[in-house]
Image (cartoon, rainbow, N blue to C red):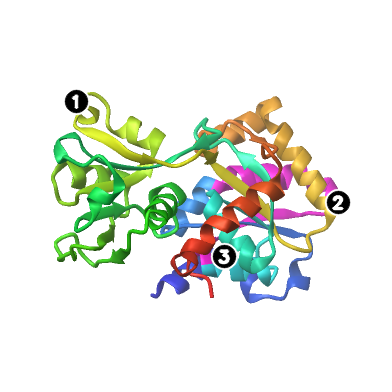
Amino acid sequence: MSPKGLLLRLSVPLLCLSAEAFAAELVLGSIGRSPSDEIRDLKPIADYLTTELKGDGVDRVTVVVAPSIAVMAAYMKEGKVDLFIDSPIAAAAVSEFSGSRFLLRRWKRGNAEYRGTIFVRKDSGMSRLEDLKGKMIAFEEPFSTSGHFLPRIALLRTGLPVTPKEDPSQPVGKDEIGAVFSRDNENSILWVLKKKVAAGATDQQTLVELSRGDIMKKLKILQESPPYPRHILSVREGLSPGLVARIRNILTKMHEVPEGRKALVAFQNTERFDEIPGGAEELRRKLLEEIRLIHSEVGLP
């Protein structure tokens, strides 16, 4: 079965039916390689919203997982997904194409913000991004903000061409940086430690968490991005303002009530949802400026 077929099987059947048939259904979306895992992670929030929105004409909240930014953008543009939770650059890319807007910040695993990093071995002799010319870097996932987009933007801003490679063993030209996807933060760290690649990319917190003790002593951060919100909740264009206001109120207050806290903890140990510092539109504008550097990489038309 194709990935798209698997996606549709694991998603709710609403995608095969008309919007009118499920007028009282709200759809929460995310992007991921494993639809079953994403659905399991998001279910506590979907269930909580279902309970809280019963009096607002919403019978149920379901979950749909897209395999890429482009597919999620299409879903939101077509009204097949109402709410979308993901990292900031993925959220901005979806917004650029679909017209969705940022609503709230999610504190994922207790963190309100994070930074993308490029790291190398301490004994590599490298001290600046230019030292990566002729070498290979391991990004995490194609749609990862901290493990791909932010580090790639940093390299592009220094005028360093990044060339996709199929395998870490492929040759890299002396005036380029080769790039592969490790598909996992732990893989990126191990590949750097074993000298399979010269550098890796992930967020600062994950690097510290996965590199405790002697491992962290062998690594150093070569570049670190400015801080960005850990995750963004977006709403599709055209969703009822009254319903959006209710969703905002429910989510920003759920950490104050026992059932809400329970659902947040079940959702990958989320601490809370809150307002985006500096304003949602200002953050969106800033991120859109960033993704224009990597427009082809985010998979949008």
Q: Quadrant of residue 257?
A: top right
Q: Residue at label 2?
A: 242
Is the C-beta separation of discs 3 and 1 under 8 Å?
no
Give me the residue at 52% from left, 49% from top.
87
Q: Amino acid at mark 1?
A: Asp
Give me the residue at 67% from left, 37% from top.
277
Q: Residue at label 1?
A: 214
Label 3 to label 1, Cα distance in Å? 40 Å
Residue 257 visible in the snapshot: no
Q: How many marks?
A: 3
Q: Disc 1 or disc 2, which is closer to the eye?
A: 1
Within the magenta stretch, is there residue 24?
A: no
Q: Amino acid at mark 3?
A: Met
Q: Residue at label 3?
A: 72
Give me the residue at 46% from left, 70% from top.
296
Query: In this picture, is 49 found above or below 25?
Result: above
Q: Amino acid at mark 2?
A: Gly
Question: Which numbered disc flags the more N-terminal residue, 1 or 2?
Answer: 1
Is the C-beta separation of discs 1 and 2 under 8 Å?
no
Residue 107 visible in the snapshot: yes
Question: Which numbered disc flags the more N-terminal residue, 3 or 2?
Answer: 3
Q: Residue furthest top?
A: 213
SS of the residue under disc 3: helix
Label 3 to label 2, Cα distance in Å? 24 Å
Drawn side of residue 269 relative to residue 60, left or right:
left
